[in-house]
Every structure is written in structure tokens, then in C-alpha cells.
Amino acid sequence: MRIIICMARLAVTIVLTAGCMEFYVATNGNDTWSGRMAEPNAEKTDGPFATLERARDEIQKQKPNGATVFVRGGTYFVSTCLEFGPEDSGAAEAPIVYRAYESEKPILVGGKPIIHFVPHKNGILKADLAAQGLKGVCFKQIFFDGKRMHLARYPNFDPDHPQTGGWAYVDGKLVGMYQDLPTDDKRLIRCKPADAREWANPAEGMVLIFPRHNWWNNLVPIASVDRANCTITLARDCSYGIRPDDRYFVMGLFEELDAPGEWYLDVRTDTLYFRPPGPVEGKPVYAPTTRTILDLKPGARHIILQGLALECSEGTAVAMKDTEHCLVKECAIRNVGDYNGCGVSIGGGKDNGVVGCDISDTGSHGISLSGGDTKTLTPAGNYAEGNHITRTGVFYRQGSGVAVSGVGNRVAQNHIHHVPRFGVLFSGNNHIIELNHIHHVSLETEDTGAIYGGSWSWLSAHGVVIRHNLIHDVIGCGRKGGEWKSPYFAWGIYLDWTAMSVHVHGNIVARAPLACIHLHDGRDNVVENNIFVEGGEAQVQYNGWTTTTRYWPQRIESWIKEFESVADQPVWHREGSTLRDPRTVALPDGRTMHHNVLRRNILCYRNPDAMAFRFRNVSFEDNPSDYNLVWNFGQPIKTGALTIKRTIGPNLAPNPGFEEGNLGGMPSGWTWQVRPTPEAEAITTDEEAHTGKRSLRIRSATTPDLKGKEEWRRHTMVKSGDIAAKPGQVYRLSAWLKADRKGVPAELVVQSYKANTYHLHLQKAITVDTEWCEYEHIFKFPAEGDRQYHPEMKTFYIRPALRQDEGVLWVDNVCLQEAEALDEWESWQALGMDRHSLIADPMFVAPEKDDYRLKPDSPAFKLGFEAIPVEKIGGTE
């Protein structure tokens, strides 16, 4: 592996000025010596210090104009946190440096070795901790021969299937992940009978569980166990209600000490029980005694840590809080952190960095990077560059390679791979994420991506630049129905909810289960000059919201407060700013995703069933796409767009003008589908009509007890009688609609349903005003080979609906006709999209080797495509 590091940042040259002092630390040193010699003298009266603390204290005492502490090779046990404050600071021209001596490898262990193991039984060894100075020390991890061991657990860890194996599953009837239930319990686990266990002291144990959503896990102590009823009650709430089929395991109970590599700590007797995976002779066993190994306190400045190895801590290896110009450089950080602990944490301050480090096996993130002021958009300038990061999120499975927040920070040229969730997780503003090589990520979670940001906060994810990254093999793992799947439900680059004014350009994204890039709502984003290869279901995916989408009304009040908190700040309103008042962000039809631009990208994929573009609930006019190069190896380009040349034959809608039937009653040929309350009505009326004498009036009415129900149960829905369908036939459905007020959410739906057999739901969401207007829904009834096809599905019905708790909707002149359609690419262009784009081979140099450089005569250059500097990307050969 070759990590290319940005030389502008790594030009942290240690300038040894005339007043700079040198000290030495060695495992054979002595803190009573001067520390000015690399080796003890012949008389053993002078030589290096034995500890970094002593070197730090001597620098404080001497107050030199800069100093370098050379740390000799060997293992140093840092039994308590080593702190550096303002008094330990250097200067720009004279930093304080703690670094490895020449090519030697010093290792700082944030704990103590455990020795004197004796046999217990069944291959289990035990050690008396009190006799080793560890009386009353309650640690949650041990490390053997450089690897973290498993706290005794059920089910056992499955080394052959480390991500998908070793889980128990909550019992019960499956419930949809996105279906809200008032009966959800955040503390109760219903175990399957086969997973009922006997534990003498269950309150010693913990449960690691993914509750409801497979986004992240919780690690929660056990309160009690009811074996007769097969339940575990947790001591505190999980993030979400616990659902059937949620995966979990139990750990920390003596009875589960039954597999190699497991251990258990009896805090009552200070005894460690350990079943090693191999002989312990000559191989170290460590237990952490520190939460943080090296802690740089507020006000510390110009301190450099270079070439050190740090391992074995319950929390973070190196923490910086409100420091300036401090640097962790070329260090190896491994086997550190619990649910909240990461490799390196930089919180606040400015111009601090983590550069060229090798970080692995962390409890949470590899690097946590924050700083900067949101209100004034003052950048922090903190950075993570040229690092190699892998196997994060051992305990907190949201743990990403780099998590960056705040304002004006940089994540560049890192090689990130084999992590449970995101490669880079971002929130905040004006960050630069560039030249990273990210692959084999999102191994254990779903609804995820290699680079992800933008949710919850209205002020988050503005002005972020994502450029020149190489992303491939985004995996994803989750469940669909009762089946656990991988790869599953993941994207390459994922801009969620509140991502605004993000510039995504010059990236290469190859192989993601859903699409190479996903814009989930969001505004004013630019996606240009990227190469998207082999997106599973699509290459580019947009999913828009409306102001009635569930999360929008839930969050709008907090978003307004966030907007108002910076509304008087000029920096948020300077030229080019895209900050929007959330109250005015919606388009006239209620849709909230707009002003996103897609241009000069290359889309290349072989799967004939995959789509080039998959846009849902998006205004094409307000989200333009053009000058792209698309290549599906000569196969038809699918876009999901459907337009027609002409209609054919008679109107197939029953009683289309609602002229038949008793006035004041349900019109002939129509009936209820969902009547949320007895007060809701659907009747033939002569008070309003577009043409003729009558129309259908739908009046919605709901009650407080429906507020928490699924959204569809609150809507007022009427359906037609069954209409014979032709598989593969394209139809045009239209209706004239009018409402009693402006902006009423409604829908035209085509549906076919048989319980436990098939469910076709083709929806057109619309917003209706107070004047009669025609709304159109073009659709294709599935044919054999289509995803929603079922051989028993031979009919469908029309379903207009009022998607509002209160209000009136009038429907008239429903028309359903067969139609002759354009192909999907022609339809896409007819809708105004990609009219200048090309369908052509992009002419990659060697795509079979993931070499997506373009040959000189690539047609992409004719569209203005610019070459991507792949030679600068970190972690590439």
C-alpha cells in the first residue's frame, strides 16, 4: 500500500533553533538521570529518562526554545493518562516534539500486563488481579498477542462470518421498519425459546443490539431476565423501540465463557478468567487502565507526536481539546476505544492535524474531527490527511473512518476500508473531503454510504466540497422482510435531508448496491465531472420530499429556530450563499428538493436491469441534468421516465364523470378503500362540476387517536371497480381536481392487491389548488420479467385520495386510456432532461483493474469532462 500525503500539510519541518533542546526516553532509562543521552553511560550514572512524564516535566522546568524528545524502541506502560497543557507548548518555529528515535518503534500501552495465569477448568485460565496491583479495577477489554479478545458472549463470535454471524434475533411477528407503533418498547427483548439462557448474575451483563433500524447499535446493561417468559429487560432505553428480528448478543456473563478468545472479569474476587485462543507463554495479555493515553488540554500549542505506537485504552488514544497547531504524525494507533472511544479526537481549536497514521481496531471512529464556529462560519482548519484507517466501530457500529463536523475542516488522501458504516461521515459547513480512497465500507449497516452527510440540522452540510475521491465496493447489510442480505441498501455518496450547496465533483464511484450517488431531498447541490460505474439499481438516484413528508413537519420548528439563529449574520448571506428560510423553501406544488444540478458525469454499467437515473418525487425542471455521457454497453437506457406519443381506444374508467348513482351517495362503480372516521365522506354532488352536472366530493375528517397511526390510515381514499389489465401496456390516467383551499396534498394511485400474494402501488403525488386543473399519471402495468410482475395480477383499480386530515377534494372527468409510449431515454429527453448528453463508450484505460482514466479520444472530453487526478488519491498503487 502506498499512501500519498499532501506535502503542503506535511511540511511540518522540525526546526531546531539555537535554543532547542534534545531529550531521550528509553525502557532502560531512569527518571533521576538528565535525559540528555540516548544510552546510559558506562557507570550507569546518567542517560535517558524512563518516562515521557519526566521528559515533559523537564521541558516545563527548562523552558527551552523548542525541544525534541526522542523515544527509544520498546514498550512503555502508561498506567494513567499523560496530559499536556498550555505550559507544555512550543512555538511555530520551535515546537515541542515527542518522536520515535531513528527507525525504532516505541509502543505506549495505556494499561498493564496481566501475568501469572493458572489453570481453572475446560481450557480456562485465571489470574489474581489484586496481587498484580489491579484490585478494584473494572475494565471492559483485554488484549492478547496484539488482538482484542471477546468478552464472554452468547451467541459466540463467528470468525468465519464476522459481520453476519454470531447473532441472536428478537422473537415475534415481523413489523415494517418504517411503520411507527405506539407499542414499541425500548427496553424489552423477547428472546426466542432456543436463546433462553441460565445466568446466575444477569445484571453483570450487557446487550449489544441494533434496535429497529439497522443504522447503529446500542450497548446497554441488563436490568433483569425472566427466563420463564423468555425476556430480557434492559437498564436504559435503546435509541428506538426493539422489534422482532432485531439482532443482538449478550456479553459479560460467566456462563458464556465457552469459546477460545473469550474472557470474564469477576469484580467480586478480582479474578480474570480467560480462555486463550493459543498458548499464553511469551505472549502479552494487557488490560487497559487509562481512558485516554495522551490528552492535549485546552491552550496547548505546537506539540507534535511522531512515530509512536499507542494501544490498549478504554477510550481515545490521543485527545485534543481546543488546542492549536498540534499534530499526530506517522503514529500507529490500534486496539483502543469503547462505544465512545476513537483513535484520535480533535475537538475545537484550530490547525490541528492527524497525518500519515495507521489506525485500526477502534471502538468507535478512527478519527473524530471537529472545530470552527457555525454562527460566524469561522473555519477551524483541522485536518486528517494521508492516514490508513480500517476496522473501526468494534463497539459502536456507526463508527466511521473519519467523522468530521464543525466548520472548515479537511479530510484528504486517506485510505479507509473495512469499516461497519461510513468511510467519511460529515456534518457542518465548508469542509473539504478530497483525494480519499474508500472501499469495502458499510459492512454491517444499511441506509448508508461511503461518504455521508446532511440530516437533522438545517445549518449542517452547507458548502461542503467532495472531490477527487476513489470509492468502490460499498457493501451494506440489512434485512428485507425476514431475509438478511448483503450487499444491500447502500450508496457511494449519500447527501441526506439538509445537504445544501454541496459540490460533488471529480469523484470515481464504482459498485454500490443501490446507486453511486443519492440525493435525498436537499437543495442547491452540484454533481459534476464524476465517474459512476456499476450502480446496482441505478447510477444516480434522487428522492424528493414534500412538506407533508413525515420528517418535514416533525422538524420544521427546530429548523426555523436554527435559521433564525444565523439570520442576522452577514457571512451567511454573502454572495453565493444558499441558506434558505425553511418556511419558504417549498416549490408551489409542495416539493422541497430543487436547484440541484447534474452535469458532465460519466455513467457506465453493464446490468440491463439497472437504471441510469432514478428520480422520485422530483421536479425535472428544478433539478436539471445534461451533458452527461451514458453507456450501458449498447443496451437500452432506463430512466423510469414514461411519456406517450398518443392515446388509444376508449375511456376505461368506470363512471368517469360521476353522473351515475344517487346524488349524495357513493357514485356507481366506486367504493371506499380507506375511511379513517365515520365523519369522512365520499359522495356524488352537484355543488361543483368541471363538466356535466356532478362530481365526486371527498371530505376528510380524522380524530386525535389516529394521529400516531400509519400515514395511509389517516388518508381518505376512494377506489374504482376492477379494470382488466394488459401486461406491459402503458396507460394514461388523468382527472380534473379542485380543493377547498390552496396547497392540498392529494394523489392519483393505480393499485392491484391480493393479500400475501402481490401488491402493485403506482402513485402520483399532487398538490391541488382552488381552481379546476387536470392532473396526469402515466404508468405501465408490469409485464413478465418486470420487478412487480405477478402472474395472478390481472386487474387494477384507480384510487384518488385526499392526504390531509381535514379538507375537501372534488374529482371529475376521470379518464383512463391505453397509450403508445416512447422508450425511456426518449421519454427522459422529452421531459427536458439530458438533451445534450451522449450515449457512447467512455473508453476507460483498464476498467477491469479499476483504472478509470480516460483514453485521449474519449467522447467525454467533447462534453467538457476534465481528467480526474487519480495519481494524487491516497492509498492507491
Image (cartoon, grey):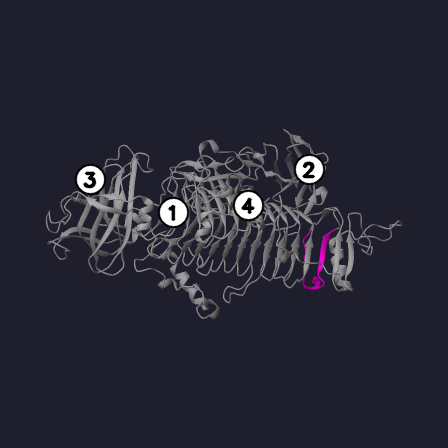
Badge 4, how many Cα within 10 Å: few under 14, some, many 20+? many
Q: Amino acid at mark 2?
A: Ala
Q: Quadrant of the C terminus?
A: top right
- Secondary structure beneath disc 1? strand
83 in magenta: yes
Task: Mark 3 vs mark 4: give the one in front.
Answer: 3
Q: Are marks 4 and 1 in contact (CB under 8 Å)?
A: no
Note whether 377 is above or below 493 in the view shown: below
Q: Which residues are magenta?
A: 80-100
Residue 814 drawn at (x, y percent): 18, 49
Note whether 115 is above or below 449 in the view shown: above
Q: In this orientation, which residue lies closer to the viewer: 12 or 834? A: 834
Task: Mark 4 vs mark 1: give the one in front.
Answer: 1
Q: Earlier in the sequence, mark 3 or mark 4?
A: 4
Q: Earlier in the sequence, mark 4 or mark 2?
A: 2
Residue at point 15%, 53% (across, down): 695
Q: Which residue is mark 4?
A: 393
Disc number for residue 613: 1
Badge 3, how many Cα within 10 Å: few under 14, some, many 20+? some
Q: Amino acid at mark 1?
A: Phe
- Secondary structure beneath disc 4? loop
Apparent side of residue 736 relative to residue 188 in the rendered image (left or right): left
Q: Which residue is mark 3?
A: 723
Q: Earlier in the sequence, mark 2 or mark 1?
A: 2
